[in-house]
Image: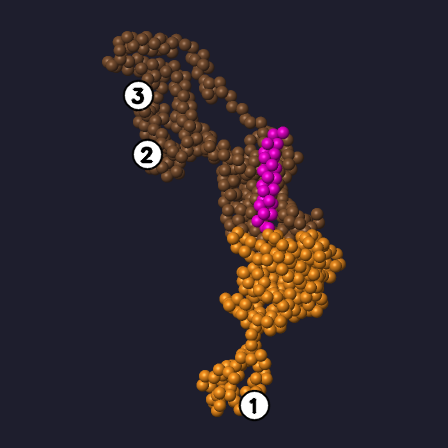
Amino acid sequence: MGKVFTLALKDLTLLRRDLFAMFWVVAFPLVFGLFFGAIFGGAGDGARSAMPIVIVDQDQTDGSTAFIDRLDASTAINVEPSDDPEASRDLVRRGKRVACIVVRDGFGKSFGGMFGGESLLEITIDPSRGAEQGMLQGLLQEAMYRSVIDRFRDSTVARESSQSSIDSIRADEGIDPIQKAILLTFMGSLDTFLGTIDPAMYEDAMTFDGGGGIETVEVETESRGPTSFEISFPQAMMWGVIGCAAAFAISIVQERTGGTFLRLRVSPISRAQILAGKGLACFLAITGVLVGMLLVETLILGVRLGNPAGLVLAVVCTGVCFVGIMMLVSVIGKTEQAVAGAGWAAFLVMAMLGGGMVPVFFMPRWMYMLSHASPVQWGITAIQGATWRGYSFTELLPSCGLLVGVGIACYVIGVRVLAITDR
Amino acid sequence: MIEAKDLRKTFGTTVAVDGLSLTIEPGEVFGLLGPNGAGKTTTIHMLIGALSPDSGDVLIDGKADPTRADVRKKLGIAPQSISLYDELTAEENLRFFGKMNDLSGGLLKERTAWAIEFAGLAERRRSRVKTFSGGMKRRLNLACALVHDPPIILMDEPTAGVDPQSRNHIFERIEALKNDGRTIVYTTHYMEEAQRLCDRVAIMDRGRILALDTVAGLIAAHGGQSVIEAELDRPPDDADAIDGVLDGTSLRVETDRPLERVAALAEAGLSFRTLQVHQPDLETVFLSLTGRRLRD
């Protein structure tokens, strides 16, 4: 066992003295975590980024102003007024804004009318922002509904609208006489109702509860939702883990091509011990990176440690997994260039699918499903689970089990391939 | 003693070593001489157990498995490539390989100091290897094979790519090891190295041993005669009396006794403007055995 530790110590010394490798293992993850944490967190003030849209008010009435004010009051969108519809649409085309809304002339006058006419609200939306499109339509519906309610809260204004509708029905020669009689009867009854009801009771009845009885409940993760650093740091940690695995995979092939592996093979030490030393060094490096990043997270950025014992389990399992992957990657090719190229390509795909670049909740459905096959995602899930999500041990088991299982399988395959190619 | 019996090794369709047998006695410096691709390195790797032969056996001191820990302690290898850690210092490299070979404590310290001295790197012991010249790296590469004091040392092209000064340093050290009674297996494609250092030489080509003997024995058996080439001051008066090929004033004579023959020519009244004597060497032996030069 002493020789295994000596081998591991040698490898850690080599890693520490390799500035290029140290950049990927330490500096890059730290910068990644801080940079994206700051960006997504509004430079760390905790405010969420709102959807940027541009609005052109061609109507310029009290109704259109009230409608725009209602949209602006939403924290989900950031409204930017404009006078130029073409320039505004171009901003969307170029991806600078998510959507452009043009409030056409006549919007305020017809708003709240009982019967539809021409479209007075034009929406141009970035086709690549499908999720935001649905969200924006919902927000527009809400703003319009609230404006209608405001209009009908004043019975005088409401009666003006019903009288206007009665006049329109009477003037329309195209409506079937029987249908016209039914509509006039209904509108007349409504007008009578609006003229006789107690205004206080009427106001109480006209409320908006955010969606017909829907109550929004926050997910229970201790006391608050995750901060941007709690999202970005697990991603950044996985980049550090990947950096370690890549560095050690390359070091194995360097030893093989450089002759030091041969020198070790002639020493009174088994191949298994040599590889165990390499694996131990990789494991210690991964653990060191994860612990270092967690210390920065908790001591400087105030990230929560929901389940410390679970976090130890998550760190160990992530280390085991990527030691195994390192061993497998090291036998992909016979030269340093081949292993570095193919290894980083494999790691990038893992990171891309696993949420190492973009959080999985931003991914399209098909990609989100694929992310379940990536060890990077298991690692992120385990670390997030043990920190701000507050997973129990039982809840951590699926991710941790996959990490350990895949790690052991990869290690065994890598060692076998190396033994075969080394004969 | 090292014994190889009918070793054979192929890589795909390439036969690297084809039925090689040899015996190396304790205290002997044994040379494997051959061009690049002759199978020297593959042979070395099979002798130390780093490669498994497809067939045949290797015995080190009568033990059949060179991968056994007790056998490996007796072996030191200086690979053809510089097998060192560039980011470690000379001393750190030696200490690391010493520990891998079961050295510790005072013995490790003592042997590391010896190896530093052996490599002539006392003043650079704490410098990282990446800052060394090619010759310094070669010397350290050899020292790492010796740090655990093995009785059997295998050196695979130990002077490849070094300057003459470092080469001489390495030769002197190998001669010191030879005088110390170590068994040395030495591969090279430089015939002058084999001639200077080796007690016996096996000439290899295309995975086979073509001839195996002492240097003198090989030359006597396969080297042919010495050649005297001379430019005369004037053509001899009696050209028919000269036993050689005469072309104007140029003379070429083949003989087993070149010095005696030169003396005889001088007594016959020939006056030399230039005189060269070419004695047969291992290059001539290789040419005679294969029809090719060593460095073709």
Q: Is residue A313 visible to the viewer in this orientation of the structure?
A: yes
Which quadrant does the N terminus of chain B fall into?
A: bottom right
Total numbered circles: 3
Q: Which residue is mark 3?
A: A117
The answer for which chain carries disc 2 is: A
Start and end of the magenta stretch? Answer: A394-423
The answer for which chain carries disc 3 is: A
| Closer to us: B133 or A56 | B133
Give the spatial CA distance, label 2 vs label 1: 117 Å
Residue B227 in percent (x, y) is at: 54, 79
Other residues around mark 3 within 10 Å, as few (<14) / some (14–19) / many (≥20) = few
Chain with colour orange in the figure: B
Residue furthest out toward the front: B240
Give the spatial CA distance, label 3 vs label 1: 133 Å
Q: Secondary structure at mark 3?
A: loop
| Closer to us: A398 or A70 | A398
User: Residue B267's mark?
Assistant: 1
Q: Nearer the viewer, mark 3 or mark 1?
A: 1
Chain with colour brown in the figure: A
Q: Which residue is mark 2?
A: A85
At 38% from the left and 11% from the top, the residue drawn is A194
Name the main secondary structure of what is drawn in magenta.
helix
Residue B122 on the magenta span: no
- On whether disc 2 and disc 1 are found on a single subunit, the reply is no
Give the spatial CA distance, label 2 vs label 3: 22 Å
The amino acid type, in three-letter code, at marker 3 is: Gly
Residue A411 on the magenta span: yes
Q: Secondary structure at mark 1?
A: helix
Q: Above or below — where is A160 with respect to A403?
A: above
| Closer to us: B150 or B168 | B150
